[in-house]
Image (spheres, rainbow, N blue to C red):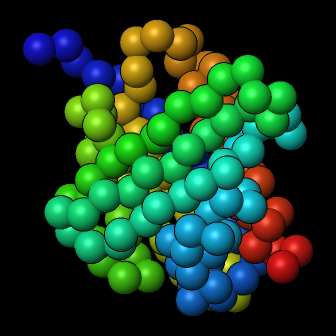
Amino acid sequence: MENKTKITVECIVNSTIEKVWNYWTTPNHIEQWNNASPDWHTPKAINDLKVGRNYIFTMAAKDGSMSFDLEGTYTDISIHKSIKSILADGRTVSVDFITLGENVEVVETFEAEFENPIDLQRQGWQNILDNFKKYVENN
């Protein structure tokens, strides 16, 4: 079995844990922030936030040239603290929400895939997290 590289991205959001959690887990909010660059978007998000249930985020180029579904199954959920899941391709993802006074640190760790360079994967996931921070703080 191949050893999978783990990548961690993080940000500090100036908001309450309740708002951060809500915006992270609610499909209509996910559709607003879940993109790695301005020429991509998430036209559809389905999220059944229960252990053993699934999420499917359709990510697409705005020009219609390409799209894919990011799909996973929840393996552990601790409300306002952490979410763990396994992607359809078997890679794990964990997201920790750490309350720091009036802010929330979001720490996301995922197993890298083998198709794209590690730095590109890290930058893409960091861009999505940065979009999340901006969306929460501006809405």
* Residue found at the very far left of the displayed protein: 1
Residue 90 visible within the image: yes
Residue 64 sits in which quadrant?
top right
Q: Residue at x 53, y 12 (%)?
A: 116
* Residue found at the very far front of the displayed protein: 64
Horizontal side of 52 relative to 86 (left or right) equals: left
Q: Nearer the viewer, residue 122 or 138?
A: 138
- 134 lies above or below 110: below
Horizontal side of 88 relative to 125 (left or right) equals: left
Residue 52 on image: x %, y %: 18, 63
Q: Quadrant of the C terminus?
A: bottom right
Q: Quadrant of the N terminus?
A: top left
- 108 lies above or below 90: below
Residue 129 visible within the image: no
Residue 49 sits in which quadrant?
bottom left
- 26 lies above or below 9: below
Q: Residue at x 47, y 61 (%)?
A: 46
Horizontal side of 113 relative to 21 (left or right) equals: left
Q: Residue at x 67, y 35 (%)?
A: 60
